[in-house]
Image (cartoon, rainbow, N blue to C red):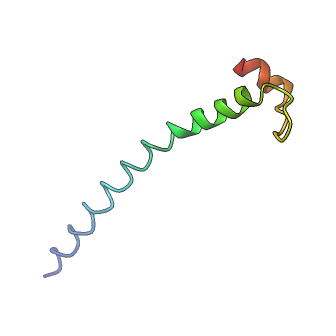
Amino acid sequence: MLPLPLPLPLPLPLPLPLPLPLPLPLPLPLARARPWRHTGGQRAGTPSAPSHFEARFR
């Protein structure tokens, strides 16, 4: 009775953390690199990116 409920909750949390870290690192670098390139430095209605950031991504 006791050992049964213990092993059940263990396999459940295992598959959850696996798929989470995979999709996170992919959209992060893309979303960071895209806005700086899209703005192109100074553009109306868009926040100006720092000079050091522009030099790195350009």
27 or 14: nearer the viewer = 27
Q: Where is residue 18 in the image (x, y as percent from the top left)?
A: 36, 48
Of residues 47 and 18, the one drawn nearer to the viewer in this rendering: 47
| Residue depicted at 42% across the width and 50% down the height | 20
Residue under the point 15% across and 74% down:
4
> Could you say where residue 52 lies in the image, as x and y percent from the top left?
82, 23
Count of marks placed on residues: 0
Image quarter of residue 8: bottom left
Up the image or down, 22 lies above or below 51; here it is: below
The quarter in which the C terminus is drawn is top right
Residue that protrudes farthest toward the front in the picture: 44
The residue at the far bottom in this view is 1
Q: Quadrant of the N terminus?
A: bottom left
Residue 44 locus on image (x, y percent): 86, 36
- Which residue occupies 61% across, 37% down? 31
Where residue 21 appears, as percent x and y from the top left, is 44, 45
